[in-house]
Amino acid sequence: MPKFSIIIPVYGVEKYIGKCLDSVFNQSLNDYEVIVVNDGTKDNSMEIVKNYPVKIINQENAGLSAARNTGVSQATGEYIFFLDSDDYIEKDLLLEVSKMLDNNPDLIRFQIREVFEDNTPSIDFNEIGFLGIEGQEAFDRITQYHFVENAWSYIIKREYYLANNFSFKVGTIHEDFGLIPLVIIKAKIVNSLNYIGYNYLQRQGSIMSGKDYEKTKKKVNDFYNHYKYLLEEINKTNLRSDTFKSFIANSLIIKICELEKEDYKEYKKKLKEDKVFDNLLADSTVRKIKKIIFKIDPKLGTKFLK
């Protein structure tokens, strides 16, 4: 059994997949398998992939969630790692993670660097690491930082992932938000290392950077459904979930601010009906003020946050 299963969905990334795979096969630790899921790509990405010793799974285009789920079903490693095909990793990432496995963690977090196609200087996101804490406390700490629900920010114990029947919701956008908060908070042992090991590429034309308003409306609708699912799932547990509920509520409130006019008003009304604002923490003066402003007008609240 390999230590790591690296799952890479591929669709329309012929410009990036070579650098991604080079970064994997240049790792200083080689105890891994690479599973590339061809999500029905129509460009030359797979011609590039075939030059590398990877396990290829072909499927009709079904989106990132379905591709990741397929990859998990074929993984044999002790830990799984979701690597996006336009990103790349530092050569010692797996080595540094392997040093954090002695306490048998369910989840290992590492640090992120944003890199840009237009030669804008990269941005390092440094955090204070920790070792051997439960998911509830880990969630409290992680939500203080920039990246929280991004699947590629973590390496996850496969046994833990399968035992909890985790999977990404197929056919949706913001699929990470709909799953990873649960992966964090349900974990028994979480480690976080200070090492910046992941390079997150900011590029034009990606799913998350599209400007089409119909897509924006789908993003918000999917986000709302993810929120309701997360709330339902956390309410089934006995976990301390005040920070969790506040995080998902805050994220949803900010998300609806991408909408325009009547759509915005409609979702603002839905938030009130579903008592989303009630889940916001109000344990400090700043949070109390923020909660009041959000209830009045989320867009005004986002300006207050700046």
Image (cartoon, rainbow, N blue to C red):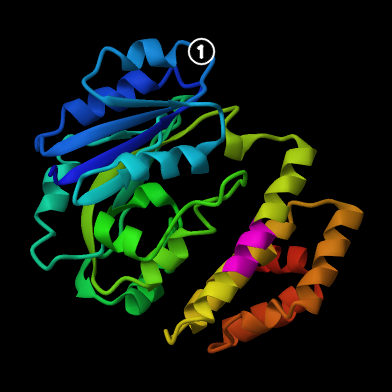
Q: Is residue 92 left or right of residue 113?
A: left
What residue do we see at 73% from left, 59% from top? Answer: 256
Q: Amino acid at mark 1?
A: Asp
Viewer-nearest residue: 239 or 99: 239
Residue 76 vs 272, above or below: the answer is above
Magenta run includes residue 287: no
What residue do we see at 22% from left, 44% from top? Answer: 76
Query: Quarter holding the N terminus?
Result: top left
Residue 29 vs 240, above or below: the answer is above
What residue do we see at 31% from left, 55% from top? Answer: 126
Residue furthest out toward the right? 262
Regarding residue 123, the answer to whether it shows in the image is: no
Q: Residue 257's spot in the image, x, y percent? A: 74, 57
Q: Residue 136's spot in the image, x, y percent? A: 37, 78
Viewer-nearest residue: 80 or 196: 80
Q: Is residue 175 left or right of residue 150?
A: right
Q: Secondary structure at mark 1?
A: loop
Viewer-nearest residue: 2 or 264: 2
Q: State the extent of the magenta-drawn residues as a range.
A: 223-229
Residue position for label 1: 43
Q: Residue 207's spot in the image, x, y percent? A: 59, 35
Dot 1 crowding, Cα within 10 Å, few <14, some 14–19, many 20+: few
What residue do we see at 46% from left, 21% from top? Answer: 13
Regarding residue 207, the answer to whether it shows in the image is: yes
Q: Residue 167's spot in the image, x, y percent? A: 45, 54
The quarter of the picture where residue 26 lies is top left
Query: Quarter holding the C terminus?
Result: bottom right
Give the number of callouts. Answer: 1
